[in-house]
Image (cartoon, rainbow, N blue to C red):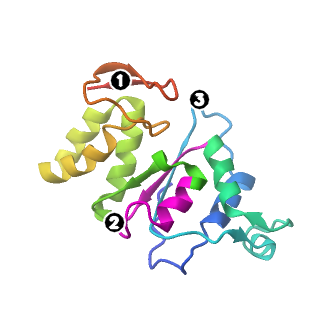
Amino acid sequence: SIYGEGQGGDAPESYGLFANWVNTHVEAPNAEEMPFLIVFGDITMHKTVPAGQINHYLGDKTQDADAIAEWQQVARKWNTWFLRRPTGQPGDQVDQQWSEAIGAQKIIRIEDEQRAVDYALGLIARSWGYFGDFQENMRARQDEVKVEQVSKVIKMICPTCGGPIPTSASGLFKCGYCGTTLKLS
């Protein structure tokens, strides 16, 4: 589900609580492949999720949780991406923390946050072999500049592992990093 919380939160934010909830309350038992989990954000997370917070919001009796470890666990079960709002500098504290949590290759710095859903849908379309269809659909709503702005970030990365895809790749392409086969247009 896509949900824009709006108005932001404190800095750092409680991304770790969300990861704990995913780890303890969310299942996708019938998924044939790793399901997508896409987070849109711009700030670091609290390093620790207090047990009292987990109990209060999730009703779980537990100990404090390490937010990075929670996200690492999420990333083992979910095709996890962090869509980074156009704030800060590449390699800053936000990028460093999220890199540790889910892997640097799974952070996408978006140029236009109004297109956040397009970036997310593009990742999914790329994974399923429908990136060309995604681009055509986007052209019905956006000008070519916006289509290219969103596409350029997505089209040269593997949607499963974030590994680079050579610009010369076309047709069926097997990612050398994770082994995923992609249908490229």
**Amino acid type for the residue under numbered disc 3:** Glu
Q: Residue 139 or 119: which is nearer the viewer?
A: 119
Residue at x-position 44% and y-position 36%? 163
Note whether residue 143 is visible. Answer: no
**Amino acid type for the residue under numbered disc 2:** Pro
Q: Magenta segment, which residues?
A: 78-99
**Amino acid type for the residue under numbered disc 1:** Lys
Q: Secondary structure at mark 1?
A: strand
Q: CA distance from mark 2 to mark 1?
A: 30 Å
**For residue 29, above or below residue 74:** above
Q: CA distance from mark 1 to mark 3?
A: 18 Å
Crowding at mark 1 (Cα within 10 Å: few <14, some 14-19, many 20+): some
Which numbered disc, 2 or 1, marks the residue closer to the eye?
Answer: 2
- The residue singled out by tag 1 in the image is 183
Residue 159 place in picture, x, y as percent: 43, 37
Q: Residue 129 or 16: which is nearer the viewer?
A: 16
**For residue 95, above or below residue 137:** below
Q: Secondary structure at mark 2?
A: loop
- The residue singled out by tag 3 in the image is 32
Note whether residue 162 is visible. Answer: yes
The dot on residue 86 is: 2
